[in-house]
Amino acid sequence: MIVRTLSEAVSVNWGNGVSRRFLLASDGMGYTVTDTIVAAGTKSRLEYRNHLEACYCIAGSGEVVNSAGDAFPIVPGTLYALDNHDPHFLVASPDEDLRLVCVFVPALRGDERHSLDSATFSHY
């Protein structure tokens, strides 16, 4: 059995926020669970070429924008899933941080960070 508290999770500053990673590849579960904070007022261009990700909003607000430009509001109680390695923008509202519980498959090593260069997508 694995039991971890937020203070024990691996904390990674990914550029526009912090990802607290509860489960990693080394835990042998096959997936990662994170508690992720996206800083208020940020816009992150992201793409996971090696992972699928589902995110469930537990606090704050923002939107996820797909490569076609369609924007989907994110508020507490909203889940979005990047089921096709979808390139996307993750935007936190200007007045509050966005907090997400995320699941990555396959699991992250733990040290991955985003490249937030506007000309390229990050690729885990």
Image (tube, rainbow, N blue to C red):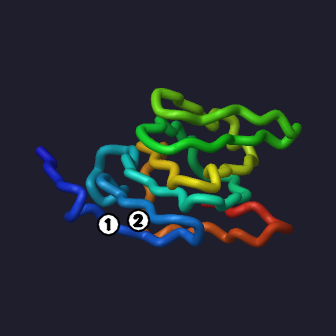
| Residue at position x 75%, y 41% in the image | 65
Relative depth, front residue between 70 and 32: 70
| Residue at position x 17%, y 54% in the image | 4
- Mark carried by residue 21: none
| Label 1 CA crowd tier, 10 Å (few <14, some 14–19, many 20+) | some
Q: Is residue 124 visible?
A: yes
Relative depth, front residue between 37 and 111: 37
Q: CA distance from mark 1 to mark 2?
A: 7 Å
| Residue at position x 46%, y 56% in the image | 37
| Residue 106 place in picture, x, y as percent | 47, 47
Q: Is residue 122 above or below residue 87?
A: below
- Mark carried by residue 110: 2
| Label 2 CA crowd tier, 10 Å (few <14, some 14–19, many 20+) | some
Please state which of the two labelled residues, at mark 1 or mark 2, is closer to the viewer: 1
For label 1, the residue is 10
- Corner quadrant of residue 30: top left
Q: Element under label 2?
A: loop
Type of amino acid under label 1: Val
Q: Is residue 51 left or right of residue 9?
A: right
**Mark sitting earlier along the chain (1/2):** 1
Q: Is residue 44 left or right of residue 71?
A: left
Type of amino acid under label 2: Gly
| Residue at position x 21%, y 64% in the image | 7
Q: Are marks 1 and 2 in contact (CB under 8 Å)?
A: yes
Q: Is residue 49 visible?
A: no
| Residue 117 place in picture, x, y as percent | 76, 72
